[in-house]
Amino acid sequence: MKFTMLESGVLAMPRADIDTDQIIPARFLKTVDRKGLGQAAFHDWRMLPDGSPNPACPLNAPGAAGAAVVIAGANFGCGSSREHAVWALLALGVRVVIAPSYGDIFRNNALRNGLLAIELPGDDCALLAGAGGAIHVDLQRCEVARGGYRFRFTMDAFARHCLLEGVDALGYLLARSPAIAAFEAGRKS
């Protein structure tokens, strides 16, 4: 799915070191199908032991439903390399995570699966999380804005291209099949 611009509500989760087991607990990793993983996202934070919603969890706050942007603390997605964490966030409806830093494997999994992982300094994240109103994310201009604050971000050019085009690395290569075939044909002569 192409990503160019997004306007959304925000889920502020300023805690540092949110690991992939918190994003999706290991007991939900019994599938390679992405279906239903959104219900498992942050399960142990969202639900109380009796199965009822935890009112202290930002995901259960009034107005949280439909928010496609998470603003988190440093080292978001640290821990194991489970790709299911990214799938669970996407299935939950999250399209963007903004944090001061990421677990390296999580950031790569995010960008390869269509989840925009924006890295901003902690103070900028705090300002965006505390500002009111919708957040605006513009991938073409590499800009994020909310409540009078506007910040530019940088990211890997290839990942940005793939997100803007709505393709993964394989889709990128397949779109260039005619050029690849022409190159190969030229090498044979």
Image (cartoon, rainbow, N blue to C red):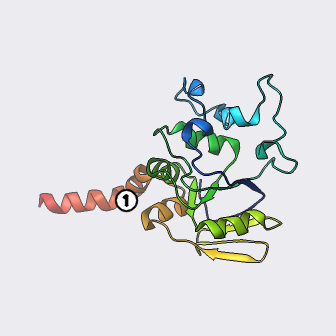
Is 156 left or right of 91, judged from the image as shown? left
Name the amino acid, label 1. Arg
For this orientation, the residue located farthest to the left is 189
Q: Nearer the viewer, residue 160 or 174?
A: 160
Query: For mark 1, what is the residue?
Result: 176
Residue under the point 54% across and 37% down: 84
Question: Residue 3 in the image: x percent, y percent?
Answer: 61, 60
Residue under the point 44% across and 52% down: 104
Question: Residue 31 in the image: x percent, y percent?
Answer: 54, 25
Q: Nearer the viewer, residue 127 or 67?
A: 127
Give SS at disc 1.
loop
Rendered position, 3 above or below 52: below
Residue under the point 76% across and 31% down: 47
Q: Nearer the viewer, residue 162 or 49?
A: 49
Number of marks in picture: 1
Question: Residue 92 in the image: x percent, y percent?
Answer: 69, 42
Is 68 left or right of 117, judged from the image as shown? right
Residue under the point 46% across and 60% down: 159
Is 15 left or right of 112, judged from the image as shown? right
Rendering quarter of residue 158: bottom left
Instruction: Give the quadrant of the C terminus.
Output: bottom left
Question: Residue 11 in the image: x percent, y percent?
Answer: 74, 53
Rendered position, 123 above or below 172: below
